[in-house]
Image (spheres, rainbow, N blue to C red):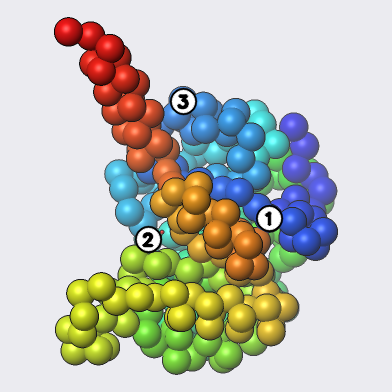
């Protein structure tokens, strides 16, 4: 497969479409290959939550690149060295967790772009194999920079974050967002509803002409969020999908025996 065109996810978004993605938490090239063969537009290798380490990423990328699925990575924290190493290895986009201020968003986007747009250091040792020898000439426009909005602070600084040049998309983390908003309300009700906050974030992204994305645990949530305007849907994760399929099969067979 050739990724030598510009990032395919941008073409989907520019045509008004939705990118369907899932998270990879199983540190295995084989598991990544199985997931990539199911037709996801993109898959996100998750270095933030789960047992995947830097060293696992290489084989997982090689497996994903046997298909047209676009590989992204979620870094453990907003830190430039891991962003650069993941882009050099061949990830086509980075999801940065817990981006709370404009300065953090600028640092995040800058690490994904070569000068003059950013401060990414040169050294794409594997990317050229997939993206072609001219990668370094267009290395600044190929990677997708996706900032996670998942705290009360980020909600407060929404317009400042969303107006950072070069930011492609935001990704809402509903779990952290709920915890952060609840903490801000000094404990508040245990059933805090984050629907209003999510609506506010999607509306702000649309105002700034930035793609809105969100994590959704179920297909029903995914459809609902897509209808609300999200164009990047991260639906569940390999580990959860394996658990769910295995559990359902066993339940069905037990229901039909003694
Ligand atoms: C969250 O819900 O906080 C997430 O980070 C989902 O990936
Ligand atoms: Mg989170």
Which is nearer the N-term, disc 3 or disc 2?
Answer: 3
- Name which residue lies at 51% across and 27% down: 34
In terms of secondary structure, where does tag 2 sit? loop
Say whether disc 1 or disc 2 marks the residue closer to the N-terminus: 1
Which labelled disc corresponds to residue 196? none
The answer to which of 162 and 57 lies nearer the viewer is: 162
Image coordinates of residue 163 in percent, x first then y, are 64, 87
Of helix, strand and loop, which one carries label 3?
helix
Q: Mark 3 sits on what residue?
A: 30
For residue 143, which quarter of the picture? bottom right
Q: Is residue 15 above or below residue 58?
A: below
Q: Does residue 169 appear to the left or right of 79 in the view shown? A: right
Compared across the picture, whether 156 is left or right of 161 comes to left
User: How far, Cα to Cα, is label 1 from label 2?
Assistant: 25 Å
Q: Nearer the viewer, residue 6 or 54?
A: 6
Closer mark to the observer between disc 1 and disc 2: 1
Mark 2 Cβ and ligand 2 under 8 Å apart: no
Q: Residues within 10 Å of mark 2 (few under 14, many from 20)?
A: some
Mark 3 touching mark 2, by CB under 8 A?
A: no
Disc 2 marks which residue?
76
Can residue 119 be spotted in the picture?
no
The residue tagged 1 is 18
Q: Nearer the viewer, residue 166 or 25?
A: 25
Q: Which of the four quarters of the rendered structure image does ligand 1 lie in?
A: bottom left
Query: Residue 124: horizontal and vertical position, in percent?
Result: 63, 52
Secondary structure of the residue carrying numbered label 1:
loop
Instruction: Specify the quadrant that holds the N terminus.
Output: top right
């Amino acid at each position: 497969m050739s990724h030598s065109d510009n990032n395919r996810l941008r073409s989907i978004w520019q045509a008004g479409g939705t990118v369907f993605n899932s998270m990879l938490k199983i540190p295995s090239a084989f598991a990544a290959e199985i997931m990539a063969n199911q037709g996801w537009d993109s898959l996100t290798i998750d270095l933030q939550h789960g047992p995947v380490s830097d060293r696992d990423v290489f084989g997982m990328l090689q497996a994903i690149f046997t298909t047209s699925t676009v590989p992204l990575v979620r870094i453990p924290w907003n830190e430039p060295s891991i962003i650069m190493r993941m882009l050099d290895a061949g990830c086509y986009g980075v999801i940065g967790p817990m981006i709370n201020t404009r300065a953090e968003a600028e640092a995040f986007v800058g690490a994904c772009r070569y000068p003059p747009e950013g401060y990414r250091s040169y050294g794409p040792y594997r990317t050229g194999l997939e993206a072609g020898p001219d990668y370094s000439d267009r290395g600044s426009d190929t990677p997708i920079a996706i900032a996670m909005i998942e705290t009360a602070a980020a909600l407060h600084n929404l317009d400042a974050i969303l107006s950072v040049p070069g930011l492609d998309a935001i990704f809402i983390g509903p779990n952290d967002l709920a915890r952060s908003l609840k903490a801000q309300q000094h404990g508040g009700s245990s059933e805090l509803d984050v629907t209003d906050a999510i609506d506010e974030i999607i509306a702000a992204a649309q105002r700034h002409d930035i793609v809105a994305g969100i994590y959704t645990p179920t297909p029903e949530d995914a459809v609902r969020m897509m209808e609300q305007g999200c164009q990047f849907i991260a639906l569940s994760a390999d580990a959860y999908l394996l658990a769910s399929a295995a559990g359902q099969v066993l339940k069905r067979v037990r229901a039909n025996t003694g």
